[in-house]
Image: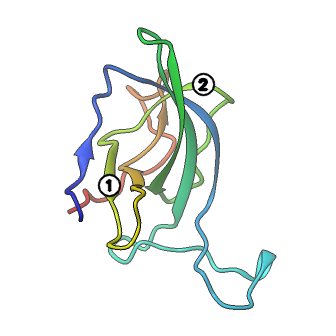
Amino acid sequence: MSFRNLVIDPNRYELLFQESEPVYVYEEGVYGDDRRQEHDKDTGFPVWTVRVTASDSMNREEQALEVRVIARDKPDAGFRELVVMPNLRVQIYSRRNERSVTTRWSADAVAAASASKSKPTAQPAKAAA
């Protein structure tokens, strides 16, 4: 079973930056610095995993998310700094023989909230289909 992307309401959650790292192409027997970073087929930009804490202060809950972002430069902000992630969305699916549900988060960009009105820290990518 598969669903279309669900777009997350940016007014309900504050997103607090943790860290970012490259997404590597899986190659059998290739480890460490020998790995190649994944690149978007349309833009040619590198793919990054950005870890954020989604904080809902009204309900007093937090959840860690790993969000894929396509950006020319490595997304960066201070630890637990408030960031914005335009078009934050989640793709939810399950496999036929599994009982669990898998989620895959993505966003068009990531920027420090204080700088989001002036200049993003990462270049926005194309919109997902």
Confirm or deny contact between disc 1 and disc 2 (CB under 8 A): no
Q: Where is residue 13 in the image (x, y as percent from the top left)?
A: 40, 23
Residue at image mark 1: 92
- Residue at the outermost bottom position: 28
Number of marks: 2
Residue density around tag 1, few if under 14, some if 14–19, many if 20 or more, within 10 Å: some
Q: Where is residue 83 in the image (x, y as percent from the top left)?
A: 49, 29
Q: Is mark 1 on a helix, strand or loop?
A: strand
- Residue at left offset 40%, top offset 38%: 85
Residue at image mark 2: 81
- Say which quarter of the image contains residue 21: bottom right
Depicted 23 relative to depicted 112: above or below: below
Residue situated in front as seen by the camera: 26 or 107: 26
Residue situated in front as seen by the camera: 19 or 114: 19
Residue situated in front as seen by the camera: 82 or 95: 95
- Residue at left offset 29%, top offset 36%: 8
- Residue at left offset 58%, top offset 79%: 25
User: Left of 112 or right of it: where is 100?
Assistant: left
Q: What residue type is labelled 1?
A: Ile
Q: What residue type is labelled 2?
A: Glu
Mark toward the start of the polypeptide (1 vs 2): 2
Pair 1/2: label in front? 1
Q: Is mark 2 on a helix, strand or loop?
A: loop
- Say which quarter of the image contains residue 56: top left
Quadrant where the N terminus lies? bottom left
